Image (cartoon, rainbow, N blue to C red):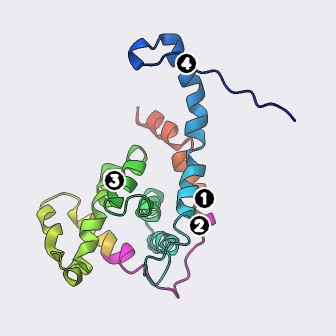
Amino acid sequence: MTDLVEPPRASFTSFEESTKDDWSLIMSQRGELEGSLPDRILEQMEHLRNDYGGFPVNRLEHSVQTATRAEKDGRDDEYVLCALLHDVGDPLAPFNHPEIAAAIVKPFVSEANHWMVEHHGIFQGYYFWHHIGLNRNTRDRFSNHQYYDRCEEFCAEYDGPAFDPNYQSNPIEHYEPLIRDFFGSGLRNRKKSES
């Protein structure tokens, strides 16, 4: 049996005590963390597979159905990625899942798509909150926001109708290259092209 050799670690017990050498060591190992992000995103998506929560389809099917609808409608890759991941935070944070998904995509997408993901829960509420004793018009507080129409359209066209058990969605594997592109080297490549 081969003993695993652990990578070297910094020696500080408080950030205040850290040194340049400590941070060089930490940053030398950061690439592995960043490089494995696509795998962790796909792993989180798998948590949606067995979660129905009373809905007609499981949360993974809802997610791929939302993305498939957006893709078939000709939306660009970034929009499709947002459609795919908009509910990824639901199992971990059922009370604020849009904020979780928005935080995940923020470094990788436009301000417009980030805002859409972050606010989709309130906009989706228009279709059902009145059935559970909440104000369906809560989204109106954003009526003058520049991305209001974008979020309203996302919920009406893609998120809202994506609960159809008979819809032929692309499988999650179809979106793996997209996830790997955006969350792999995609951020570094996009930042280089922006500068």
What residue do we see at 42% from left, 49% from top?
A: 104
Label disc, if present, on residue 176 of the rendered structure: 1
Q: Main secondary structure of the magenta part?
A: loop
Q: What residue type is labelled 2?
A: Ile
Provide residue 10's location: percent of width, then percent of height.
55, 18
- Position of 130 with respect to 23 (left or right) is left
Query: Residue 164 location, x and y as percent?
Result: 46, 85
Residues under numbered marks 1 and 4 in contact, where contact means CB atoms less than 8 Å apart = no
Crowding around mark 4 (Cα neighbors within 10 Å: few <14, some 14 to 19, many 20+) is few
Residue type of the residue flagged with mark 4: Ala
Q: Which of marks 2 and 4 is in front?
A: 4
Residue 188 covered by magenta stretch: no
The quadrant the N terminus occupies is top right
Local SS, label 2: helix
Q: Which of the image's four quarters has the C terminus? A: top left
| Numbered tag placed on residue 10 in the rendering | 4
Marks 1 and 4 sit apart, C-alpha to C-alpha, by: 34 Å
What residue is pinned by disc 3? 114
Query: Mark 3 falls on what kind of element?
Result: helix
The span shown in magenta is: 156-173
